[in-house]
Amino acid sequence: MAETRTVTKLAGRALLVAVESAQLRKDIPEIKSGDTVRLQIKVVEGIRERLQPFEGVVIRLRGGSVNKNFTVRRITNGVGVERTFLLHSPRIEKIEVLRHARVRRKQLYYLRGLTGKAARLKELRPLTSKQVAAKEAAKAAKSASTTTPTATPAAAE
């Protein structure tokens, strides 16, 4: 009797993984805490369905796989509004990441107590192509300089 229970648990787990992997969406960008995102959410009103935008700062990421969810906070008419969304939900039409911010925490609950300029986050700007090229050149020069001193004494002898 005990053997059949373990077999069903393994089969159940495999079935659960198969169903969950079928529900995962592929069109979702990588989002992190501190990102400013714009969501297009499907809202059903009676028989009509429309898209409603919601833009704010991601203050929390939780869960994993199909159950991964995130909370977005925005200030509307001086009132803070937070909504939690399932990342792989079919109700979310589109997610756009507008800005990345430098944060040192995963959950930004401290933003709830801040208003105005104090609630701003330091923006991370993407590197330009010139900056990327300069960074690669510096990295190559550094690796070349570390290999050169070992080769120089052998040539002197």
Image: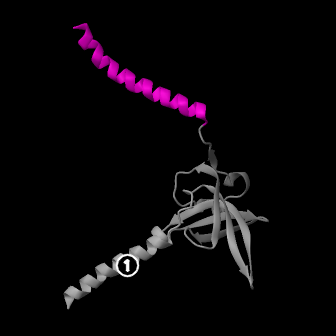
Type of secondary structure dominating the magenta stretch: helix
Q: Nearer the viewer, residue 103 or 52?
A: 52
What segment carries the magenta color? 128-157
Name which residue lies at 56% across and 63% down: 60
> Is residue 124 rendered to the left or right of residue 12?
right
Q: Quadrant of residue 78?
A: bottom right
Q: Residue furthest right?
A: 77
| Residue bearing mark 1 | 15
Q: Which image quarter holds the N terminus?
A: bottom left
Secondary structure at badge 1 equals: helix
Q: Is residue 64 visible?
A: no
Q: In the image, is 52 to the left or to the right of 23?
A: right
Using the image, determine if residue 66 lies above or below residue 102. below
Q: How is colour applied across the structure in the image?
A: one colour
Residue 69 visible in the picture? yes
- Front-lying residue, 17 or 33: 17
In this rendering, position of residue 135 left or right of residue 110: left
Q: Residue at x 69, y 68 (%)?
A: 81
Instruction: Give yes or no for residue 149 being in the magenta stretch.
Output: yes
